[in-house]
Image (spheres, rainbow, N blue to C red):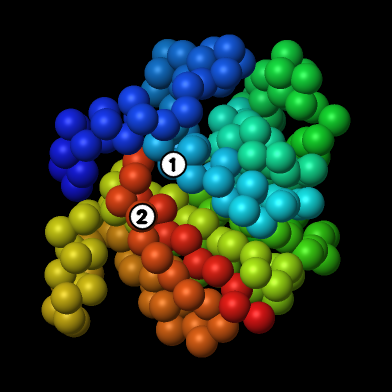
Amino acid sequence: MVLSEEVSRFVRAAGPDHTDVQTRMADFARDHDFPNIGPESGAVLRLLARLTDADTVFEFGSGFGYSASWFLRGGADRVVLTEFDADELDQGRRFMADAGLADRCVFEQGDAMETVERYDGPFDVVLIDHQKERYADAFRAVREKLAPGGVVAADNVMRGPIDFDALLASLDGDAGALDAGTDQTRGIAAYLDAVRDDDLFETAVLPVGSGLAVSTNTA
Ligand SMILES: C[S@@+](CC[C@H](N)C(=O)[O-])C[C@H]1O[C@@H](n2cnc3c(N)ncnc32)[C@H](O)[C@@H]1O
């Protein structure tokens, strides 16, 4: 375990409570074994929307809208939700309608990598939370579409469908550490390389939830 359960409990207890609809979303996720971003990272998404005074947030991989609900709580005027799975997106529509937030959501069914091509930006915040092996491509797709001071957050950089120990060894300089690993772990490594090597961006990794890499556009 990357973060001790006690520390996670502390962060959750000291952080914001769920709204009623978020409680239902969390219950739905638990019942369907669905990996949403969780309340620890959700609180950070809310903060990012608030700090950037976000007009538009774009998400790669929205599920049924749990992460989007945190951006909306942070005052985002509009969140673009993208999702392969039509049933998940329909469930998201229902939750957002119940929360009175549907008019601030744009629901886009299909491949997020294609959807993003139809948007010019500017995006104030982008969440990358879809296929791990496509994270670096997602960053490249939005890099020029970010508002000055805009933020890209990527989930699962420390936990989830990835090998934490291999990733750590690679970051520590073991060149072969990822050779036997999965495409997902290599995808996260490639993503971290892409944002850390980019002179226009400053990146901090926050060990909340499954690990969030937060990169700000310094333009
Ligand atoms: C980890 S879940 C997203 C959870 C969501 N961000 C939240 O915290 O509530 C990943 C979702 O991305 C979707 N997905 C994966 N690849 C995608 C793609 N290329 N385009 C659109 N959706 C994708 C999956 O169907 C899945 O629902």
Which mark is drawn over residue 135? none
Q: CB of residue at label 2: within 8 Å of ligand 1?
A: no
The answer to whether residue 112 shows anywhere in this view is no
Q: Earlier in the sequence, mark 1 or mark 2?
A: 1
Locate the N terminus and report the quarter of the image it occupies: top left
Instruction: For mark 2, give the secondary structure.
Output: strand
Q: Which residue is mark 1?
A: 41
Q: Quadrant of ligand 1?
A: top right
Instruction: For mark 1, give the secondary structure.
Output: helix
Left or right: 149, with 212 as reference point: right
Left or right: 117, with 127 as reference point: right
Q: CB of residue at label 1: within 8 Å of ligand 1?
A: yes
Q: Which residue is mark 2?
A: 206
User: Within 10 Å of the Cα at label 1, are there few (<14), some (14-19), or many (20+) other Cα atoms?
Assistant: many
Where residue 192 appears, as percent x and y from the top left, is 39, 70
Where residue 204 appears, as percent x and y from the top left, is 40, 65
Which amino acid type is marked by label 1? Ser
The answer to whether residue 145 shows anywhere in this view is yes
Q: Residue furthest bottom?
A: 199
Locate the C terminus and report the quarter of the image it occupies: bottom right
- Camera-nearest residue between 79 and 182: 79
Q: What residue is drawn where x is 59% and y is 78%?
A: 218
Where residue 163 appears, as percent x and y from the top left, is 22, 55
Which amino acid type is marked by label 2? Leu
- Camera-nearest residue between 185 and 139: 139
Q: What residue is drawn where x is 79% and y is 27%?
A: 102
